[in-house]
Amino acid sequence: MKSANEIWRDMLVDLETECSAVSFDVWIKTLEPYTVDERNRLILVATNEEHRARVNASHRILIKLVAQKIAPFLSDIIVIESAEKDLYTAPDAKVEEEKKPAQTYAVGNPINPKYNFEEFVVGKCNEFTVAAAHAVSEAPGTKFNPLFIYGGTGLGKTHIMHAIGNSLLISHPEKKVIYVSSEKFLNDFISAIGNSKESQNSFRDKYRSADVLMIDDIQFISGKERTQEELFHTFNDLHDSGKQLVFTSDRPPADIPDLEERLRSRFEWGLITDIQPPDIETRIAILTKKAHKLQCNIPLDVLTFMAEKIENNIREMESLLNKVVFLSGLTGRAPSIETVRETLKDYRNVTDEKINPETIIECVCKYFGTTKNELLGKKKNKEIVEPRQICMYLIADLTNLPLGSVGNLCGGRDHTTVIHARDKIERIMPTSDRIKNAVTDIKSMIYKK
């Protein structure tokens, strides 16, 4: 039987997609798993009485539904305060830990055991990439080194990274596997160079001692010269030693701006492979498998309707399914096309709802308290340049317009200005809560129009 920590870790993956970012970060992620008691109840510890009361009032039903899906043997969810721990029987955690196979070589971001090759639906859109990933996990460092995977958001790049990691931990448990996001690599590097020589050596020892180094969303090192230099030397050290490197990106190396040519050429040494949006048959297969895992019987016509409505983002499609199942559980009604229609308004990748660039411009103006003339005009002060760049980023991201057309809409600017604005916003979002929150909030305004 899984421990409370393992169950809660798996639950958090689903809970994050089922509620707002604020609710998840403030109320749910801050709960601490304590134990599964003798009555098969998952005991969670709140930080204080207010925390417990809020969770019980607003989130307990959702947590219980997710728990029943992840661990059907659980009879209930109990939220307590630390002082109440003695009231609940805790199994001998040390014994359970000794029984678990040690995975001491998984370093960096945690490798999620749910994301494995068995759970990944293979279609024409991804079969070559999956085959390459299998080859890397079976014989790391011997072929396809580096493996560079690129594709749009929500198409399964991160899932494949985790699948490689999980496969390696089983077939090559002696190997040191490091999986990190580019942001984690960047933050570790910044922390190291800001401290002692010993800290810098520790950073290098950590990454250059890897048998397999996997970095997700590598495009975000664009423009960061010192980080690129460090990655270049790390790459050379590992590659020369026959160690495996795997990278993912939203675009091929040739299209990553402000990337050193020597690093770009290293990315192109091995195999570059892309993941395309899945066709309708693959989307239906993904939804069918997910529905089966959720233990929910959904008619084929309902699954087909969902697959037709969201074409280009598997993550959003699965999130839609989760919400339909959740609503069905709350209302007691069987999942139907009408339930899907009610839920679709929360998603932007709906095929019959085109986002109007004028709506984006209007929402940006409203958010920043400026006028359309000012936003699209010639002023270059920071107070207006930043909203203008966010506007260009959003139009490029949310519509299929050519970049030249985006520039025309944004005051007659050329496509190179749009590329600069788009890439700048993409680059700073991971490290700037202000920009990230602005983009998120404006998107919410757009979707509600």
Image (tube, rainbow, N blue to C red):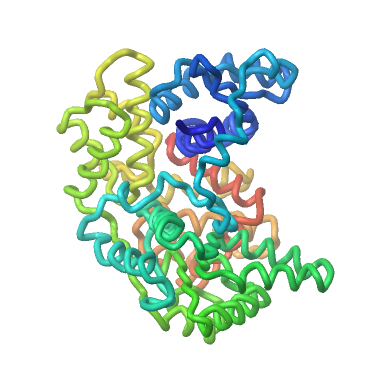
Q: Quadrant of residue 224?
A: bottom right
| x and y percentages locating residue 320 in the rendered image | 35, 35
Would you place residue 73 above or below residue 232 in this image?
above
Q: Quadrant of residue 396?
A: bottom left
Quadrant location of the C terminus in the rendered image: top left
Would you place residue 44 above or below residue 378 in this image?
above
| x and y percentages locating residue 418 in the rendered image | 49, 67
Q: Quadrant of residue 155?
A: bottom left
Is 252 positioned to the left or the right of 386 in the image? left
| x and y percentages locating residue 187 in the rendered image | 68, 61
Q: Nearer the viewer, residue 396 or 210?
A: 210
Would you place residue 150 above or below residue 49 in this image?
below
Would you place residue 91 above or below residue 157 in this image?
above
Q: Residue furthest right?
A: 196
Q: Nearer the viewer, residue 79 or 89?
A: 89
- Please report the residue visible at 28 percent of the width from the left and 24 percent of the height from the top: 339
Is residue 374 in sight in this rendering?
A: no
Is 377 positioned to the left or the right of 305 in the image? right
Disc tally is 0
Is 35 positioned to the left or the right of 202 in the image? left
Is residue 348 in sight in this rendering?
A: yes
Quadrant location of the N terminus in the rendered image: top left
| x and y percentages locating residue 412 in the rendered image | 48, 67
- Please report the residue visible at 37 percent of the width from the left and 51 percent of the height from the top: 116
